[in-house]
Amino acid sequence: MISKKMEKAFNDQIALEGTASFIYLAMASWCDREGLEGCAQFMHRQSAEENMHMLKLYTYLSEVDGFAVTPAIKQPPHSYKSVQDMFKAVYAHEQKVTASINKLTALATKEGDQTAFNFLQWYVMEQREEENLIRSILDKIKLIGEGPHSLYYLDKEIKAINEAELSKEE
Ligand code: FEO
């Protein structure tokens, strides 16, 4: 059993994760158009991961007799000034997700919903890892730069990071 307040907060989180999945999917499309194969692969994996985050919340709601609402998702932007600009947008969105998860765990405590609190700890850990990953990419972009020659190496670096992330999932 879940309270109506918690159910609404979970549905807001579902919308945020779904929005992240769409934002990253549109980023993959932009990267692909720019010939950034590694970045496109990274964004496709990231989009699939966010979709999984959304579905986990769906399943949870049905397990606790709640009702999961499929969100209306606004069309995300389809172009960026630079790779750095795109990853800055990813970082900003991840910070927004982290803040929302923190609010959700605080609400779970306030409502005395231990089941939700326990379930949400997985998201707390996931957000720490995701923010760290994106920060490390932003650091690499600063080091490598984004000139016409460095962009090729930057894309290769991001491809390697993506492959390392994929191997963690196996
Ligand atoms: Fe599921 Fe990266 O927020």
Image: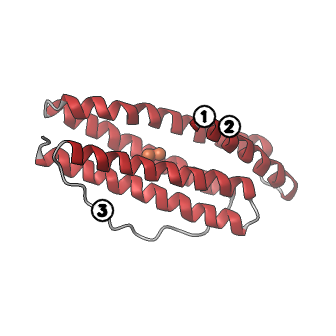
Name the residue carrying label 2: 164
Name the residue carrying label 1: 168
Is any atom of residue 125 visible in this view? yes
Give left or right: position of 168 versus 121.
right
Sequence-wise first label, 3 or 2: 3
Sequence-wise first label, 3 or 1: 3
Is any atom of residue 145 visible in this view? no
Marks 1 and 2, Cα distance to the nearest angstrom? 7 Å
- Pointer 1 and pointer 2: residues touching (CB < 8 Å)? yes
Q: Nearer the viewer, residue 76 or 69?
A: 69
Q: Residue at x 58, y 51 (%)?
A: 45
Q: Nearer the viewer, residue 143 or 162?
A: 162
As helix, strand or loop, the secondary structure at mark 1 comes to helix
In the image, the residue with mark 2 has its CB under 8 Å from the nearest atom of ligand 1: no
Number of residues whose C-alpha sits closer than 10 Å to that of mark 2, classed few (under 14), some (14–19) or many (20 or more):
few
Residue 159 at x, y = what percent? 73, 47
Q: Nearer the viewer, residue 83 or 65?
A: 65
- Amino acid under label 1? Lys
Residue 70: mark: 3
Marks 3 and 2, Cα distance to the nearest angstrom? 32 Å
Q: Residue at x 70, y 69 (%)?
A: 33
Number of residues whose C-alpha sits closer than 10 Å to that of mark 1, classed few (under 14), some (14–19) or many (20 or more):
few
Q: Residue at x 52, y 53 (%)?
A: 48
* Quarter placement of the N terminus: top left
51 shown above or below 126: below
* Quadrant in the picture for residue 100: top left
- Pointer 3 and pointer 2: residues touching (CB < 8 Å)? no
As helix, strand or loop, the secondary structure at mark 3 comes to loop
As helix, strand or loop, the secondary structure at mark 2 comes to helix
Q: Nearer the viewer, residue 144 or 5?
A: 5
Residue 4 at x, y = what percent? 12, 48
